[in-house]
Amino acid sequence: MRSLVIYSREGCHLCEQLIEELLPMIRGSLELDVRDIDRRVDWQAAYNTRIPVLEFEGKFVCQYTLDRPAIQAIVAGCAEP
């Protein structure tokens, strides 16, 4: 199953909110890979003040707040044969 990647940090309320809104939209279609930026120096350097950042297949999807139309398009694309 294909997955979305979210770069986040423990205790980040924006991250928690984005994940909470995202999960019902992708359930059954995509997995969510949550990456704590404090676990790797390169992630921390890239995303320190930008979290949450959501990516799909290495491409930027949204940051800070959920882009619902973008997620809907990704889910629809994953459902196509």
Image (spheres, rainbow, N blue to C red):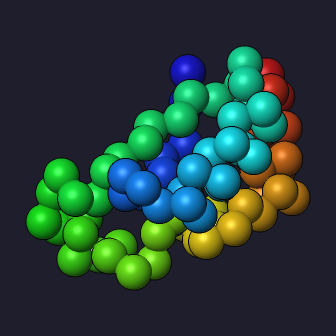
Foreground residue among 14 and 63: 14
Is residue 37 visible to the viewer in this orientation of the structure? yes
Q: Is residue 2 above or below residue 21?
A: above
Occupied quadrant, residue 27: top right
Assign the N terminus to one quadrant of the image.
top right
User: Residue at position x 13%, y 65% from top?
Assistant: 41
User: Residue at position x 65%, y 54% from top?
Assistant: 18
Assign the C terminus to one quadrant of the image.
top right
Which residue, as the protein is rendered here, is positioned at the far bottom? Answer: 49
Coordinates of residue 66 in the picture (x, y in percent): 73, 61
Coordinates of residue 8 in the picture (x, y in percent): 42, 57
Coordinates of residue 58 in the picture (x, y in percent): 45, 56
Foreground residue among 2 and 10: 10
Drawn side of residue 4 relative to residue 48, left or right: right
Q: Is residue 58 above or below residue 28?
A: below
User: Residue at position x 47%, y 69% from top?
Assistant: 51
Drawn side of residue 73 relative to residue 33, left or right: right
Coordinates of residue 67 in the picture (x, y in percent): 77, 63
Foreground residue among 10 and 46: 10
User: Residue at position x 42%, y 56% from top?
Assistant: 11
Drawn side of residue 12 relative to residue 56, left or right: left
Is residue 56 visible to the viewer in this orientation of the structure? no
The mark tally for this picture is: 0
